[in-house]
C-alpha cells in the first residue's frame, strides 16, 4: 500500500528523513517495522498476521480507522482507501 498522508510530524520525519527525533526512542524500531509492513501489504487482512499488534478498526466517530498497538497507551492509527494508507498517525487516544 502507498502512504498517501501522514499526520504526526515525528512519523513524517522518520519516514522521509529516517530521523526518529520527535518520537520516543524506544518505539522507533517498532514503528519502522510496522510502516514497512503497511507499505508491503497488499490487503488490510494482512494486518491480522502479527497478533501482538492487535489490529482492529475503531468504532463510533472513528469508524473505519485502523489501530495497531505500539505500547501500552500509544497506537499507530490510519485509514485505508483505494489501496492507500491515509492519515497515518501516532497517538494516545485512550
Image (cartoon, rainbow, N blue to C red):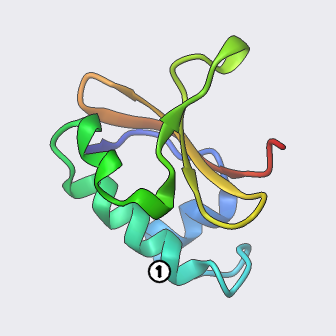
Q: Is residue 88 visible?
A: no
Name the residue that disc number 1 marks.
18
Residue 74 rendering spot, x and y as whole percentages? 72, 58
Counting the numbered discs, the total is 1
**Quarter-of-image position of residue 51:** bottom left
The residue sitting at 41% across, 64% down in the picture is: 34
Image quadrant of residue 43?
Answer: top left
Could you tell me which residue is drawn at 51 percent across and 51 percent down?
A: 54
Q: Farthest top residue? A: 60
Q: Quadrant of the N terminus?
A: top left
Q: Is residue 32 above or below residue 79?
A: below
Residue 83: where, in percent of width, then height?
24, 30
Circle 1 — which element? loop
Closer-to-camera residue (60/10): 60
Q: Mark 1 Cα within 10 Å, few/some/many (few <14, many 20+)?
A: few
Q: Is residue 4 left or right of residue 45?
A: right
**Residue at image location 47% in from the left, 80% down from the top:** 18
Judged from this view, the residue extending furthest toward the front is: 51
Please identify the residue farthest to the left as the structure is shown.
42
Amino acid at each position: 500500500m502507498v502512504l498517501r498522508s501522514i499526520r504526526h510530524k515525528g512519523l513524517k520525519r522518520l519516514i522521509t528523513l529516517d530521523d526518529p527525533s520527535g518520537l520516543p526512542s524506544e518505539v522507533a524500531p517498532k514503528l519502522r517495522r510496522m510502516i514497512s509492513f503497511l507499505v508491503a501489504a497488499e490487503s488490510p487482512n494482512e494486518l491480522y498476521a502479527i497478533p501482538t499488534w492487535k489490529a482492529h478498526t475503531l468504532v463510533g466517530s472513528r469508524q473505519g480507522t485502523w489501530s495497531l498497538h505500539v505500547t501500552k497507551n500509544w497506537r499507530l492509527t490510519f485509514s485505508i482507501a483505494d489501496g492507500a494508507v491515509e492519515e497515518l498517525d501516532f497517538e494516545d487516544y485512550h
